[in-house]
Amino acid sequence: MNTKFKFIFEKTSKKYNCPSCGKKSFTRMHHIDTKEFLPDEYGICDRVNNCNYIRTPDANIIAGFKEKKETTSTSNSIVHYYDDVPDFIDPNVFTASLKGYGENNFVQFLYKSFDKENVDRALKLHHVGTSNLYRGGTIFWQVCYQGAVRSGTVIKYDLKTGKRKKDGYFNYVHRALGLKHFNYGRCLYGEHLLKYNPKKIGIVESEKTAVIMSIRFPEFTWLATSGINNFKYELLSSLKPLSSNSIIMAYPDKGGFEIWNDVADNISSEIQIKVSDRLEKDEYEDGCDIADVILYQLSQNCQ
């Protein structure tokens, strides 16, 4: 877990009334060192399938806390708490994107391929958003274990095939918003879901694949590295506290087995991950991922 993040969810069993649904299922956030709570509206509702309320502090809140600490410090030197804190996206921007699915190519492709109820569940759990940057574009929000929205990837997919569009249809949210001097603290896509189901964990390369696998195999928590080279200790360290009591399986794209398996071997003393070589068969093309296999099987069953 990223210990540099200065605001975390309260780790006790105490719950508060949720600002959204009113149920006593709300976990508040406090400073990791001083234990000082953020205002009442900052935190997360545990009713992930019913309410799904979450609000984490934006840059202005952090700046306010920093100013407060510097002003009230009794020492002669100024205390700097937040110099190494990763930046994150305004939660209002995040929340505003979680709709407009009628104009979202990827979501519409999912509705054609799977049961709507299961798709809606996956969209909600994985925080899939709709982007105005590309018409029909999708946002895959990166929400870390502590609940902060670190950033997100913006990708456009083909409406009919569900394949990713090439020719520049890719961006990061913080870049698209023009946020300068943004300290991007990348995390695993889907990392926030580890709070709810840490026993069975699947890791894939693309966010699209994680969403599709969560529809087909919801008993697992599906994470994505957002790139073959992001299967590394820095991101996987969030799994370290869970490793001894969890089943963690990784499914690299065709051609990525050796790279991921070497990483898994190197970190096996701290994190135990079994890497599947299922796609390393001659029948699969290079770059094929586990979601491609699932979609192909579905298409064959429909014939």
Image (cartoon, rainbow, N blue to C red):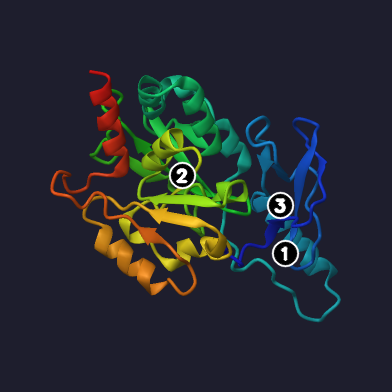
The secondary element bearing badge 2 is classed as helix
Q: Mark 3 or mark 1: name the one nearer the start of the chain.
A: 1
Q: Can residue 164 be seen?
A: no
The numbered dot on residue 173 is: 2
Taking 136 as reference, is 189 above or below it?
A: below
Would you name the residue on which mark 3 appears? Answer: 61
Indicate the amino acid at tag 1: Ile
Q: Can residue 144 be seen?
A: yes
The secondary element bearing badge 3 is classed as helix
Mark 1 burial class by Cα count in 10 Å: few <14, some 14-19, many 20+? some
Mark 3 burial class by Cα count in 10 Å: few <14, some 14-19, many 20+? few
Quadrant of the drawing holding the N terminus: bottom right
Q: Nearer the viewer, residue 63 or 271?
A: 271
Marks 3 and 1, how far apart at CA: 15 Å
Indicate the amino acid at tag 2: Val
Would you name the residue on which mark 1 appears? Answer: 32
Marks 2 and 3, how far apart at CA: 20 Å
The numbered dot on residue 41 is: none
Tag in front: 1 or 2: 1
Marks 1 and 2, how far apart at CA: 27 Å
Report the residue that reaches farthest toward the bottom.
76
Q: Residue at x 31, y 56 (%)?
A: 228
Q: Residue at x 67, y 63 (%)?
A: 6
Cβ atoms at labels 1 and 2 below 8 Å apart: no
Taking 80 as reference, is 243 above or below it?
A: above
Residue 258 locus on image (x, y percent): 25, 63
The secondary element bearing badge 1 is classed as loop
Question: Quadrant of residue 293 in the image?
Answer: top left
Report the residue that reaches farthest toward the left.
282
